[in-house]
Amino acid sequence: MDENKGYIEMGMRSSAKDIAKELFYRLGICGSLLRVSCICKNPGFFILVYHRTCASGSGRPYMATPADIFEQHMKFIKDNFKIVSMTEGLKNIYERKEKNICVSVNLDDGYMDNYLYAYPVLKKYKVPATIFLTTDYIGKNQVFWWDRVFNTVSSDEHATDRINARLRTEKESEIQRIIKEMEDKSPLLKKAQPSMMLGWEEIRKMKEDGINFGSHTKTHRNLCLLNDEEVEEELEGSKNTIEENLGAGDMEFSYPFGIYDERIKSLAKKAGFGYARAGFKGFNHKDADRFALASICAGPNLKTSFLANRISLSAFKTC
Ligand SMILES: [Zn+2]
């Protein structure tokens, strides 16, 4: 009984929060916060991060943004900010060249659904996004452990987020052991289906249309749990694979799970990357660390008004 009351209260709290967010947007408070943040500091640069994308209205895979929501987001940022590539965004903040707030779009992991559902929208709105590839899985069918967790908790995204936040700090062998135990306790659940990852053919086609590609390591493990030699293999191995297939470029990097420390930062510099995106929230200004760039997770199924809130609050908090 008490437990039910708790859930009802939680539901009421979250709907009150949602109403407040909608009001925030409709009353123009988001715009005011952005203006204040621009007065405090130079306009700055933010990075909007997505993972998977999927067909509109379908049952969403974990962390997948439906194509119609993705399009609404792209239209919103096109109408309100200057959309740039990562390289241009960094140049603007360090050389203080741009008077407008700049935004770059990133998609992590390298799922095939990025080609099917995000690419047509990126092309339509001329967004020079960067897709960060997990290079050992290019062109393969892959089951990432977080997709297996999603299945064991009956596709509850928030529950999966909480479990994954804990699991990502464990070594790979321990993650596999824990998930196997979870799956054994839920024998009626279907096994997670393998997901197709982008192949070189799709990657090259998107590159011709201005999409950029960076490294997200070879196997997407938490780098802080690996020794130097293993980290170097993850960094240099993935960088070499991309260079061999696409030629030398700006060498963009995104830390798996956004997790890094000083040791990983210096190994990323040593591997020859030009910058690295981290997982903490915020805007980047002229004092931003090129190897620990802040970002904003777009949220897989976020209304545009909620996205506007998230962006303006991030700008205000980092000013
Ligand atoms: Zn990732």
Image (cartoon, rainbow, N blue to C red):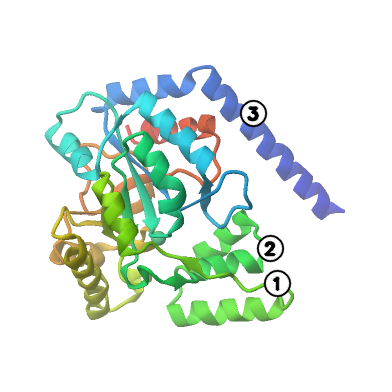
The spot of residue 162 in percent (x, y) is 57, 60
**Front one among 143 and 254:** 143
Q: Position of residue 31 (x, y in %)?
A: 42, 21
**Mark whose residue sits in front, 1 or 3:** 1
Q: Which mark is residue 189?
A: 1
* 50 vs 211, nearest the viewer: 211
Which of the two discs, 2 and 1, labels the residue nearer the N terminus? Answer: 2
The answer to whether 86 is drawn above or below residue 126 in the figure is below
Mark 1 near ligand 1 (CB under 8 Å)? no
Looking at the rendered structure, the kind of residue marked 1 is Leu
Does the closest atom of ligand 1 sit within 8 Å of the Cβ of label 2?
no
Q: Is residue 69 left or right of residue 223?
A: right
Residue 56 spot, x, y in % from top left:
57, 44
Residue type, label 3: Ile
Q: Is residue 296 visible?
A: no
Q: Nearer the viewer, mark 2 or mark 3?
A: 2
C-alpha separation, residue under disc 2 versus residue under disc 1: 8 Å
Secondary structure, mark 2, is loop
Q: Mark 2 is on which residue type?
A: Ser
Question: Residue 228 lies in what quarter of the image?
Answer: bottom left
Q: Are discs 2 and 1 less than 8 Å apart at CB?
A: yes
Q: CA distance from mark 1 to mark 3?
A: 35 Å
What residue did someone put label 2 on? Answer: 154
Please determine whether, in this image, residue 209 is positioned above or below residue 139. Answer: above
Q: Secondary structure at mark 3?
A: helix
Residue 29 seen? yes
